[in-house]
Image (cartoon, rainbow, N blue to C red):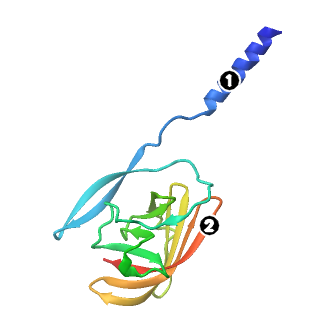
Amino acid sequence: MQLFRLFALMLVLSNLIACFDNKQPKPKTVIIPVDTSNNLKIRKQNFTVLNKIDTSSFSVDFFTQLPSSISDSSGEFYTYDTTKLIDKKYIFLSDLATFAVVKINGAEIYLVKDYQKSVETSKNTFRDVYLGNGYTVLLTLHLIKYLGDGKSYNGGKLEVQNSKYKLSFKVHGNSKV
């Protein structure tokens, strides 16, 4: 009888050990165009893409400084509609072409633009969809004012969601080409 219990215990333990996956996600390379002194250069940067789906509650935080992957000369820079743009307290940043960054619970979360789901809903109104790390971000914007030289002032709504929770904010900000 003790031999049977020992065998059953070993079987249960081996099944538990097999259930744990200790593999770390491999970084994926994203190509980021960087404009330096009117010459377009390509820089590769590794972003770790998490494979697990996040079901925890979350909050969207301000960036205290721009990440090195975002240039202050071109991109999208958005904040809450109650926050002044001159304070440079952004909650959503994008390179306009391939990826975006949002700060969730203090961590910079990189998202890839989904071109198949991103659409122009009407004249001067766009909805961009970004996916990654268990999050989906919908950015719906309308042009408020064209500022010249490839710059515009936009307003709209930012929706950030994981598999369980969804946050929605009114935003405003600039896009620079």
115 lies above or below 85: above
Residue 127: x and y, percent?
50, 76
2 and 1 marks in contact (CB < 8 Å)? no
Residue 120 visible to an observer of this rendering: no
Q: Which residue is situated farthest in the right direction here?
A: 1
**Residue that appears at 56% across and 35% down:** 21
Q: Amino acid at mark 2?
A: Lys
Q: Residues within 10 Å of mark 1 (few under 14, many from 20)?
A: few
Specify the amino acid type for callout 1: Leu
Residue in the foreground of this view, choosing between 103 and 42: 103
- Where residue 124 sits in the image (x, y, percent)? 45, 87
- In the displayed structure, would residue 114 be above or below residue 26? below
Q: Determine which residue is flagged by label 1.
A: 13
Q: Which of the labelled discs sits on residue 166, or is there none?
A: 2
Q: Quadrant of residue 145?
A: bottom left
Q: Residue at x 34, y 65 (%)?
A: 66
Q: In the picture, which quadrant includes the N terminus?
A: top right
- How many marks are shown on the rendered structure? 2
Local SS, label 2: strand
Q: Residue furthest bottom?
A: 145
| Residue in view at x 74 percent, y 14 percent | 7
Figure check: 122 above or below 100: below
Residue positioned 37% across, 71% down in the render: 96
